[in-house]
Image: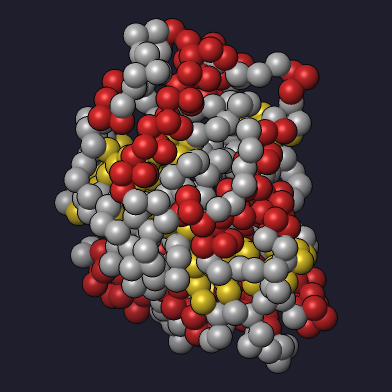
Amino acid sequence: MMFNYSKETEFLSLPGLTQLQTRKMREHLAYCKAHSPFYKDKLKDIDPETFTLDNIGALPFTTKDDIVENQDTFLACTEKDFRDIVFTSGTTGEPCRFIYTQNDLERNAYNEERCFCTAGVNAEDRILLTCTLDRCFIAGMAYYMGGMKTGASVLRNGLSSIESHLWIIRKVRPTVIVGIASFLVKLAELAQRENVSLDHIRCLICVGEPIKDEKFVLNGIGSRLQQFYPHAELFATYASTEITTGFSECSCHCGGHQPADLAYLEIIDENGNTVPPGQPGEVVVTPFGITGMPLIRFRTGDISFMLSEPCRCGRNTPRLGPILGRKKHLLKYKGTSIYPQVIFNTLTAIPGIDNYYVVAYGEDLSDSIEVVISTTDPALTPESVQRQLSVTCRARIPVVIRDTAEVAAMVFGSSRKPQHFFDKRGE
């Protein structure tokens, strides 16, 4: 397949979008039916040539458990076509293996090129990558290939020490940084202590963590980023290894645009039915154009909402709102339903909290929650944090303060991503 960036694709009319997505879906279903052992039987009653998007409910859902339990039958290519073998992060369970063909790698590069261009990155930029390019993860490699396609110079420092990133900032003065939001905060705090200016950084591509709430207002961590990088425009993104597709904000900052030629987006309720625009539900993505391990209607487990009205930027593509939480992480605490992300947003907005994590215990219909923090402010007390949590969560949640190194070891010790939630319910 050919993957060439064109602004015409970005700004198609609504009829044009429907025509494009219908064609891409038909091609995708035909490929899955012909090449994927997992989908061959599931699609036996589907005619790809006449399929319309109105019949999306007739297609099977795919879950992460399906992939874990049937990894070999998801393969839609032969071993001679393997070019890269990667694994998901495993932050929510068993890591999944994914196979990329040469086509899939080129698709990845094109996807990230689109995301960078949507955020206004161009050939004059210098992009610092703070996400890993090794350990069988795909994200850093995808950002590197996509950044190169924009014509920008790319600094692939990866998941190195925070001091090495600061050294590069001093020496090379990057204009764009790609990284997990909480890490970019830590980097800025070090820069402040070392008196290193960040004024030349004009763009932050924030990955892996939400930086906004459901009203598109910067949450605690987003607000801190804006404070530390005063001349940078913040862009929220959403992606995963499974969907191999990025939803990136434009300069209007009101949701991540669906790349119409690469994916079809749905939001569903508990029963698998599509919910109206603006209503929260589970994010479901069908990624087009993949030849190694193609997926149909992948249930991400993430909770968000879709906006369907045209964006002020002129794009007509649906937009994905901020991630509100993960379906499996929803907590029932003293009669209140709470997503851990709400707790995270509150904690990151409290000055003096250095790091944090949340532990959930319990069985059946009642959960217990403990919030563990470390702090750089000796005056900060568990009671003061608890009071602020009670405002946003409508419940008094126990808070304890522990040693900085101990909390950091929990947060950064088991994954390439910071892990702020530990679910021990049912153990």
Q: Toward which corner of the image does residue 175 lie, by quadrant?
A: bottom right
Q: In the depicted view, which residue is nearer to us: 318 or 206? A: 318
Q: Residue at x 69, y 73 (%)?
A: 125
Q: Does residue 91 lie above or below 125 as drawn?
A: above
Would residue 350 be found to the left or right of residue 74 on screen?
Answer: left
Q: Residue at x 51, y 50 (%)?
A: 246
Point out residue 312 in the picture as x, y percentages from the top left corner.
33, 68
The quadrant of the picture occupied by the C terminus is top left
Would residue 364 be found to the left or right of residue 209 on screen?
Answer: left
Answer whether residue 406 is visible to the viewer in this image: no
Q: In the depicted view, which residue is nearer to us: 108 or 269? A: 108
Q: In the depicted view, which residue is nearer to us: 23 or 423? A: 23
Would residue 335 be found to the left or right of residue 248 on screen?
Answer: left
Point out residue 48 in the picture as x, y percentages from the top left corner.
40, 18
The quadrant of the picture occupied by the N terminus is top right
Q: Toward which corner of the image does residue 53 lie, by quadrant?
A: top left
Q: Does residue 316 lie above or below 224 as drawn?
A: above
Q: Residue at x 49, y 80 (%)?
A: 226
Residue lying furthest left: 335
Point out residue 391 in the picture as x, y percentages from the top left corner.
24, 72
